[in-house]
Image (tube, rainbow, N blue to C red):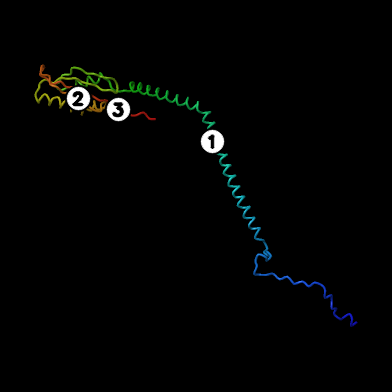
């Protein structure tokens, strides 16, 4: 029994090993004992950046392709509708021309001015001492010219002409049709010892046609 409890001296010739102990001063030789290794985060960040760049490039290319498709569609529609647009413009131009002719004809029909009535009224208000030699009517919407004579070459004859102009300018009947009455000429006629006067009656402008 004693021989069994006795420690064996062992084989002194066996090689002896030095137990391993990390050198905490050399960080490069220390094992990576973190739950998630640092290399994993680096790889994940690189993959994320690559995916982001790829998505950005793909989105931009998709937008460019969409714009090209839209542009091609618009150009196709322009090409298709161009003849129709040209015909519409030509028809509108003809319509404007015909409308102008119609308005002019309608103005002639609806014009309440009667030249005969004008002559009668002018004779009724013509003061003594003034003689009318000619009346020119250039058509509806134009003007009426009255050529007259005032006997005498003195200031009194000139006053008669001026008073007659003011009378015409304030006449309510004439004011319905004419915008203004002006004395465009007052000349001395020595041979006839008279003043030659010329009056112009300007019609009121017709209201602009509604578009």
How far apart marks 2 and 3 lie (CA) works out to 20 Å
**Mark positioned earlier in the residue sequence (1 or 2):** 1
Q: Write down the quadrant of residue 8 in the picture.
A: bottom right
* Contact check, label 1 and label 2, Cβ < 8 Å: no
Residue sticking out furthest to the bottom: 2
Residue nearer the viewer, 52 or 114: 52
Q: Residues within 10 Å of mark 1 (few under 14, many from 20)?
A: few
Residue 162 drawn at (x, y percent)? 15, 27
Residue 1 image position (x, y, % from top left): 90, 82
Give how far apart the Cα atoms at labels 1 and 3 are.
50 Å
Pointer 1 residue: 71
The quarter of the picture where the C terminus appears is top left
Residue at position x 12%, y 25% in the image: 158
In which quadrant of the rendered view does residue 91 lie? top left
Which callout, 2 or 3, points at the residue further toward the start of the chain? 2
Q: SS at mark 2?
A: strand
State the SS at label 3: loop
- Sequence-wise, the earlier of marks 1 and 3 is 1
Circle number at residue 198? none
Q: Which residue is mark 2?
A: 184
Label annotation for residue 205? 3
In the rendered structure, the answer to whether residue 153 lies left or right of residue 109 reads: left
Tell me residue 31's x, y (percent).
Answer: 69, 65
Local crowd size for mark 3, using a 10 Å CA cut-off: few (<14), some (14–19), many (≥20): few
């Amino acid at each position: 029994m004693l021989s069994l409890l006795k420690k064996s001296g062992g084989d002194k010739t066996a090689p002896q090993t030095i137990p391993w102990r990390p050198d905490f001063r050399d960080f490069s030789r220390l094992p990576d004992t973190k739950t998630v290794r640092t290399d994993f985060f680096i790889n994940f960040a690189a993959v994320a950046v690559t995916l982001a760049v790829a998505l950005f490039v793909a989105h931009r290319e998709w937008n460019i392709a969409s714009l090209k498709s839209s542009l091609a569609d618009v150009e196709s529609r322009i090409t298709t509708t161009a003849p129709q647009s040209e015909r519409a413009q030509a028809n509108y131009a003809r319509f404007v021309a015909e409308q102008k002719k119609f308005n002019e004809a309608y103005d002639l029909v609806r014009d309440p001015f009667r030249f005969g009535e004008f002559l009668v009224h002018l004779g009724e208000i013509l003061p003594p001492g003034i003689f009318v030699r000619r009346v020119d009517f250039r058509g509806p919407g134009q003007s009426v010219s009255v050529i007259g004579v005032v006997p005498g070459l003195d200031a009194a004859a000139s006053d008669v002409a001026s008073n007659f102009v003011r009378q015409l300018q304030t006449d309510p009947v004439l004011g319905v049709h004419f915008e203004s009455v002006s004395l465009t000429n007052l000349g001395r006629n020595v041979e006839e010892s008279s003043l030659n006067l010329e009056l112009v009656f300007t019609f009121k402008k017709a209201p602009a046609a509604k578009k």
